[in-house]
């Protein structure tokens, strides 16, 4: 039987992108059929005007959604967040089962489900249908290791010191950590906390992995990283869980070893890029003269933080390109006003093709929330970073960037805000002509070469992906 991989992902930008890149790479490097599936809501954002039951084809990958019972999107003003987990799991499980039956009837039986790390329920559906499965971990191996240790005996230590962000401790196969370096969901202490739902999703995933390991089957977890980057972190479970680094999963046009049509890079965008001519604006700027600022698709900017950004803009000597989502109109207006007032070179856009921006020679550094996709893209493009982590895995990612020598972490004040003076200090380190900036650029270039080598034919990640496909075929 021909292999058919079904790649399931959560309908958020930071989840869709790596799943889409994995799907594309699977289809290009093997003869397998690949179907990409996100929720109906996410599918409609990717393919406006498409019907919920419509299969979209692009020549490499098929696209067919499932229903999570939030077909018009989750709205916290309407839906109860504490009902989300049970409602999502029940509806998605039933919809996935129906999707498997439909593909079977179409003569496209699924042979392996690769499911998002928040979808522990998908493993149960796969087993009930006699279909193999693997987890897709879209965060660094270091974060997997932290969760693994937390759920295997270290929860007491972390809980006991959760109030002290600078408490330092050690976990096996990891560098020394402070509480602030941990995924933010590990600080969830009450079921009344909105993020307790997300914490439970991670907890359930590790329960599933433990059950599979107890059945004498080392579960497979595909990790969006590469071996040269996180060698020790990938050894976290001593063979109990098989971690396969297959990344970095970034826009194909950023990888010299993978040539692809540019329009594919934007196929997974759940937000439409701003029509402002930001690329032409960048073209007119000198090499390494622009500070690129973006906090991703989910992070909200505090009002006082915007005020500090405005203060920095009024005194900054650097041109800057800002991405501020359209739902943050007030922040957009204040930043644009500050640029005009200071007669500074700058532009504010609602969304952009980040890979194209980071690979532009005019960009000298990236002020980022440290989402893992953005972190990998900065590595692949060789761009130094200024880290302003907000939540989830971003504190860990900021620590990793400092370890790799590619970034500097901005320190927050008592209100959790980065002051203008601190931002100025960090940007100067990354953009200035001193030894620190030069060393960061050298480190960034080194990791760029290693990342591209990993996904090139015969590279470490390429070999791992092919081995995974071969192993799936042999079972």
Image (tube, helix red, strand yellow):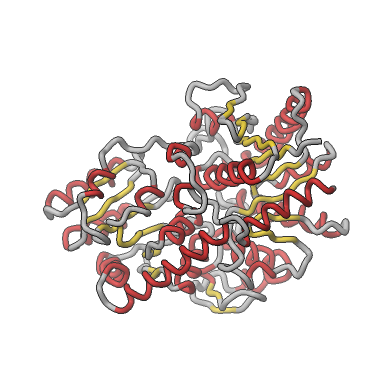
Give me the residue at 26% from left, 67% from top: 424
Asked whether, in this view, residue 175 is left or right of residue 270, the answer is: right
User: Compared to 340, does 97 lie above or below?
Assistant: above
User: Compared to 123, does 319 lie above or below?
Assistant: below
Give me the residue at 33% from left, 41% from top: 350
Judging depth in this view, the residue of 111 and 350 nearest the camera is 111
User: Compared to 464, does 2 lie above or below?
Assistant: above
Judging depth in this view, the residue of 303 and 171 nearest the camera is 171
Work out which quarter of the rendered image holds the N terminus and state it.
top right
Judging depth in this view, the residue of 353 and 332 nearest the camera is 353
Asked whether, in this view, residue 201 is left or right of residue 388, the answer is: right
Give the image location of residue 59, x and y in percent. Answer: 58, 31
Image quadrant where residue 434 sits = bottom left
Residue most toward the right?
Answer: 215
Asked whether, in this view, residue 353 is left or right of residue 338, the answer is: right
Image quadrant where residue 145 sits = bottom right
Give the image location of residue 162, x and y in percent. Answer: 56, 69
Image quadrant where residue 190 sits = bottom right
How many badges with numbers are in the image? 0
Give the image location of residue 284, x and y in percent. Answer: 20, 50
Give me the residue at 62% from left, 48% from top: 197
Give the image location of residue 68, x and y in percent. Answer: 63, 33
Asked whether, in this view, residue 406 is left or right of residue 24, the answer is: left
Give me the residue at 53% from left, 59% from top: 393
């Amino acid at each position: 039987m021909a292999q058919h991989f079904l790649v399931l992902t959560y309908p958020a930008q930071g989840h869709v992108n790596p799943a889409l890149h994995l799907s594309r790479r699977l289809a290009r490097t093997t003869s397998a059929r690949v179907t990409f599936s996100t929720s109906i809501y996410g599918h409609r954002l990717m393919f406006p005007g498409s019907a919920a039951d419509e299969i979209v084809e692009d020549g490499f990958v098929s696209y067919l959604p499932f229903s999570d019972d939030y077909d018009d999107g989750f709205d916290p003003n309407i839906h109860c967040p504490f009902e989300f987990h049970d409602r999502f799991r029940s509806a998605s499980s039933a919809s996935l089962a129906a999707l498997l039956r439909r593909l079977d009837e179409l003569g496209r039986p699924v042979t392996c489900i690769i499911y998002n790390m928040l979808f522990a329920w998908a493993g149960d559906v796969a087993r009930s249908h006699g279909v193999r499965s693997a987890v897709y971990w879209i965060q660094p191996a270091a974060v997997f290791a932290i969760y693994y240790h937390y759920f295997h005996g270290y929860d007491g230590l972390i809980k006991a010191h959760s109030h002290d962000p600078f408490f330092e401790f050690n976990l096996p196969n990891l560098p020394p950590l402070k509480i602030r370096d941990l995924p933010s969901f590990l600080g969830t202490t009450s079921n009344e906390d909105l993020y307790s739902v997300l914490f439970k999703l991670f907890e359930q995933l590790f329960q599933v992995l433990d059950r599979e390991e107890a059945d004498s089957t080392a579960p497979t977890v595909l990790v969006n990283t590469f071996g040269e980057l996180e060698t020790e972190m990938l050894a976290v479970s001593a063979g109990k869980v098989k971690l396969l680094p297959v990344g970095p999963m970034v826009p194909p046009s950023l990888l010299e070893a993978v040539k692809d049509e540019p329009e594919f890079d934007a196929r997974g965008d759940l937000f439409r890029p701003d029509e402002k001519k930001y690329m032409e604006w960048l073209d007119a700027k000198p090499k390494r003269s622009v500070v690129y600022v973006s906090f991703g698709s989910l992070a909200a900017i505090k009002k006082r933080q915007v005020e500090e950004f405005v203060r920095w803009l009024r005194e900054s000597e650097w041109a800057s390109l800002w991405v501020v989502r359209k739902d943050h109109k007030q922040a957009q207006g204040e930043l644009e006003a500050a640029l005009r007032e200071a007669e500074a070179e700058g532009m504010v856009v609602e969304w952009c093709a980040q890979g194209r921006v980071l690979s532009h020679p005019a960009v000298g550094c990236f002020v980022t929330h440290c989402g893992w996709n953005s972190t990998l893209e900065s590595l692949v493009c060789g761009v130094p970073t200024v880290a302003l982590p907000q939540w989830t895995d971003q504190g860990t990612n900021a620590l990793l960037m400092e370890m790799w020598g590619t970034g500097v972490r901005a320190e927050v004040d008592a209100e959790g805000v980065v002051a203008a003076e601190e931002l100025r200090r960090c940007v100067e380190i990354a953009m200035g002509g001193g030894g620190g900036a030069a060393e960061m650029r050298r480190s960034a270039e080194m990791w760029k070469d290693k990342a591209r080598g990993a996904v090139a034919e015969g590279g470490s990640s390429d070999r791992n992906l092919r081995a995974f496909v071969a192993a799936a075929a042999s079972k």
